Image: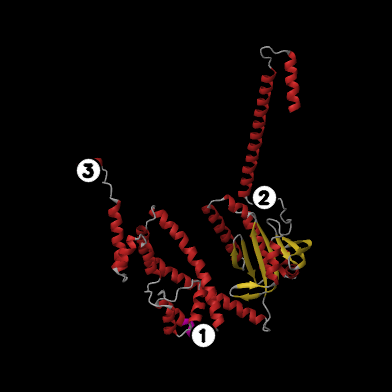
Amino acid sequence: MSPEEVVSGDAPARDPRSADDEAVARVREFLLARGVPARDIDRAAADDVLDLLVADRLLVPAERHYTESEVTERTGIPIDLTRRFWRALGFADVAPEDRVFTDLDLEALLTLRSMIELGAIEIDAAVQLARVIGSSMARIAEAEVSPAVRGLVSASGSGTSVEAAERLSRMADRSLPAMARLLEYVWRRHVQAAVRRAMLLRSRDSSGALPVLAVGFADMVGFTMLSQQLGEDELAAVVSRFEEVAHDTVTSGGGRVVKMIGDEAMFVAESVVDAARIGLALAEAYADDELLSDVRVALAVGPVLVQDGDFFGPVVNLASRMVTMAEPGTVLMSEQSHDALVRQPESAEFAFRALGARQVKDLGRVQLFALHRPGSEPMAPDRRVGRRWERLSDVLRDLDDLRERGERLIAGARQAGDEAVTRSASRPGPGSGAGRVEGGDAERTELE
């Protein structure tokens, strides 16, 4: 440090290249400790993909040794079935000569084979299970990785692979095992809940008939227009908030969110009373939310087919069709769900208004009821659609006022220009007489 720097107290500027070299050295040490050859590290650093190498070694810490045919030889599973499992898990086909499979892939296939041999699951059911696992895990992975990658880029500023690789290597020992434990915990809890539901349904009806459930849909009003007005980050915040309110409201009311379909949530409840409470709670929760618009809610009750965590049948189709017919902030019920609800001891909590029969696509004419709380009417069609929409309406009104003022100014300017042209044309020039002026006025009037 120079004397001038000591006096001024300013530290010397650090060479960013030396900081990069130090980061590369730390990442190199991390990878070498995990058995990565030095030549692979040098190649990744030269190609600026050091972060990808770290991610590969952290998440799938096994060498890619085997082709498809070699996997078949070692597992005894026919190659066509191996491909079915691979595709079901959500992975693209590979060329026959590509060595992309690892010991972890062999272990997974052997696990499936042992389950089939023990009679715990049939081949088609195993493939379907693999499909559900693959799609679910893909969504979990995207939800976990997307914000993490954005955080890495924003934290590093430049978003270089060296900085991202170092951050990944520092977080890995804690975050990956923690996430694996969390996934296993949630899986065990959901398996327990699914087993209990299945056993309870079987005890209620041992005839093998389809279970009777309440199915509901909640659809956010105006999402298409909103998505066109917002940037990427703002839209992501709206979608996240929509899902948060739906999950919190449905689960706290004793229901279960089946899936989110863009701006729509599908849920089920074993009790029609729970479903009615959830429907009203959803309408009220979204109406009071600062960020979101209102929702339309529809409820239907009846037998449903349960498969792979999803629900199918005419009742589901009816609820899905009905939600598009509801007014913002209202809850619609089918005739069957209305009749089932009025027979319950808790029916005094609710009030209804018959809406008459409506034509529902593919289902014919269906009697519908609006559900609301006693002493309050269903929300009117012109009800405010969220506070954000009030502010947007104010902005649009201001824009309309500005446009009208601009049009008036333009019209005034044109009129003033026309009058100026008229005065100029009617002014007597050298050698002109009154007749010339009259002629000019007459000609202009005719032209206009």
Q: Is residue 290 visible?
A: no
Q: Is residue 117 above or below residue 365?
A: below
Q: Is residue 419 above or below residue 87?
A: above
**Residue 153 rendering spot, x and y as whole percentages:** 41, 56
Quarter location, residue 220: bottom right
Give the amino acid at mark 3.
Answer: Val
**Residue 100 rendering spot, x and y as whole percentages:** 41, 74
Label 3: which secondary element: helix
Residue on which the image places disc 3: 6
Q: From mark 2 to mark 1, how far is it between C-alphas? A: 57 Å
- Whether 114 is among the magenta residues is yes
Of 337 and 87, nearer the camera is 87
Q: Which residues are magenta?
A: 111-119
How crowded is the residue under tag 3: few (<14 C-alpha within 10 Å), some, or many (20+)?
Answer: few
Residue on which the image places disc 2: 384
Left or right relative to 287: residue 151: left
Label 1: which secondary element: helix
Give the amino acid at mark 1.
Answer: Ile
Q: From mark 3 to mark 1, how far is it between C-alphas? A: 75 Å
Give the amino acid at mark 2.
Answer: Arg
**Residue at point 40%, 76% (across, down):** 102
Left or right relative to 352: residue 174: left
Residue on which the image places disc 1: 116
Of 387 and 396, nearer the camera is 396
Label 3 vs 1, first from the N-terminus: 3
**Residue 444 rendering spot, x and y as whole percentages:** 73, 24
